[in-house]
Image (cartoon, grey):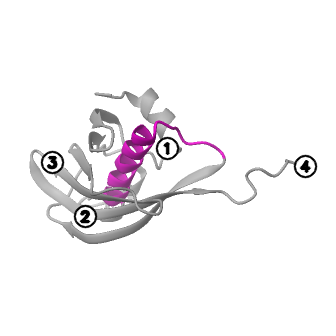
Amino acid sequence: MTAMDIRAILEHLPHRYPMLLVDRVLEVKAGESIHALKNVSVNEPFFTGHFPHVPVMPGVLMLEALAQAAAILSFVTLGTRPDDKSVYYFVGIDGARFKRPVAPGDQLHLHVAQDGPVRRGLWKFKAQGRVDGNLAVEAGLMCTVRTIEGADAPTP
């Protein structure tokens, strides 16, 4: 699969506004890598308080955007989609570094590559976020898919 618009992204992620942080996928190679975009708008709800006089995208949300891109890569690799019986968890961050602020009007390019085979249900990724070709954030990410307890139980 080479690209995804917002409709395809919504099919591959359970996230919705205001937590959906991937706007477009430019390229995804199953089992390898993804290049996605987050268009950073002044209308983002977090800019109201972070910081009103100098708006800066919170680092934790940059990492979340990278994790969401990793989730898309995982689902494409598995050939599945999110469902009501499982959840994709972001379970670890290694070596997170923030190199430059991300501000309204920026386009954050999300580059995520699978870092080795999936072991015991744990996916590892190398991730970078870039603005205008300049590194803004980088980290090693770990994610897993887990079955939701009681998901098969009948609804009363």
| Secondary element at image label 3 | strand
Inter-mark Cα distance, 4 to 1: 29 Å
- Mark 3: give few (<14), some (14-19) or many (20+) Cα within 10 Å: some
Given the image, on which type of amino acid does mark 2 rest? Ala
Q: Which residue is mark 4?
A: 156
126 sits left or right of 145 in the view:
left
The residue sitting at the right extreme is 156
| Mark 1 residue element | loop
Residue at label 2? 139
Residue 56, quarter of the rendered image:
bottom left
Identify the residue shown where x is 47% and y is 38%.
12
CA gap, disc 1 to disc 3?
A: 22 Å
Q: Amino acid at mark 4?
A: Pro
Residue 135 image offset from top left, x and y in percent: 12, 56
Name the outermost residue toward the bottom: 95
Mark 1 or mark 3: whose residue is earlier in sequence = 1
Q: Nearer the viewer, mark 1 or mark 2?
A: 2
Mark 3 or mark 4, which has the lower sequence index?
3
Magenta part, dominant SS: helix
Depth check, front residue: 56 or 25: 25
Counting the numbered discs, the total is 4
> Alpha carbon of mark 4 to alpha carbon of mark 2: how far?
43 Å
Q: Mark 4 and 1 residues: CB-CB less than 8 Å, in contact? A: no
